Amino acid sequence: MQKRTLGTNGPEVSAIGYGAMGFHLAYGAADETAGLETIRRAHELGVTFFDTAELYGWGENEKFIGRAVKGYRDDVVIATKFGFTRSYGTDSRPEHIREVAENSLRNLGVEVIDVLYQHRVDPNVPIEDVAGTVRDLIGEGKVKYFGLSEAGPQTIRKAHAVQPVTMLQTEYSVFERDVEALLPTIRELGIGFVPYSPLGRGFLTGAGKPAAEYEESDMRRHDPRWQPGNYEKNVAAVRQLTDLAASKGATVSQLALAWLLAQGDDIVPIPGTRQIGRLEENVASADLALSAEDLARIREILPDGGFGARYASAVPQWI
């Protein structure tokens, strides 16, 4: 698979990464044994960038990733995150960052964390203190690169002045475009971009179904995009995107991922899936070339993104 470099001095990774959250958070029960096979197949296909977090199963997802990549640890880049409490509040106090980093090293079974993100900005802790703590962890050889997630221009600049930010992770897809307002800032600073939920939490696979049909533990049961009124409009848009994809011998998922890759060489999406077939489909999107006409047609179908907010509540505020 083709490679991309995240950040001016960041790691070289596969153009398509892998987001592992869905095995331990937000999408219902998962078969971990099958999940390990999916991760191993991802490596066989050339995926070298794997994303996890303390929050995903409170360490269980990190342990899962650590087991999955144990045989080829040096071939891959692992990103994890700090910044939440067990009650889902934020906590980026320096002592908490250090505690989480040490836990993550043990959970992953590694000597160094490749990328350590602040999962959400903590309004109670100056970002300069956060960046300074990660800078110290980098100096101690426990972390290689610093990342932010769901941060705005002021926060990014303040953090970057203390410790260079290598990458920003935020939701971005054909469905969710607000983050495009942040791209000029990160490109000015030489920061790479990692879109999470690049397939609109599964809607852009063409397999979306009404909210009531998902189990209670699946976040899509409450996601505004799946609610009556929005759901029907989003289905209609996906049908049009599916027709465009079919004209290119591709699936709608591949079209959506290729669209993201076309937004810049500094972008590496991290789609997640539990199914090897879907994984293979996602990886193949790196070879799908879109013309200017294709890109214009996608913007015509969804000029402002999908219908409905991306969260039912607690939408991150970028400052």
Image (cartoon, rainbow, N blue to C red):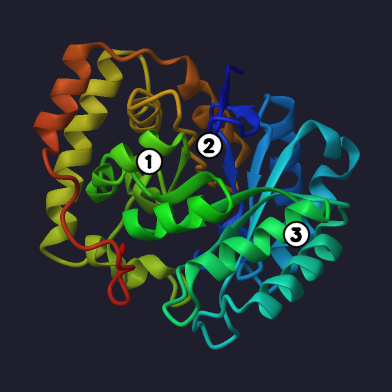
Quadrant housing residue 219: bottom left
Give the label on residue 233, or none. none
Give the label on residue 278, or none. 2
Q: Position of residue 194 (x, y in %)?
A: 48, 42
Type of amino acid at the residue the image marks with label 1: Thr
Type of amino acid at the residue the image marks with label 3: Leu
The residue nearer to you, when weighing 265 against 260, is: 265
Counting residues from the N terminus, which is met first, the one under dot 1 or under dot 2? 1
Quadrant of image for the N terminus: top right
Q: Which residue is mark 3?
A: 137
Q: Which residue is mark 1?
A: 205
Q: What residue is rendered at 53% in x and 36% in y? A: 278
Q: Nearer the viewer, mark 3 or mark 2?
A: 3
Q: Residues within 10 Å of mark 3 (few under 14, many from 20)?
A: many
Say if 310 sits above or below 141 in the image: below
Q: Position of residue 113 (x, y in %)?
A: 76, 52
Secondary structure beneath disc 2? helix
Say if 210 sits above or below 238 in the image: below
In the displayed image of the protein, which residue is found farthest to the bottom? 87
Q: Nearer the viewer, mark 3 or mark 1?
A: 3
The residue nearer to you, when weighing 183 against 9, is: 9
Secondary structure beneath disc 1? helix
Check contact, mark 1 vs mark 2: CB within 8 A: yes
Marks 3 and 2, Cα distance to the nearest angstrom? 37 Å
Check contact, mark 3 vs mark 2: CB within 8 A: no
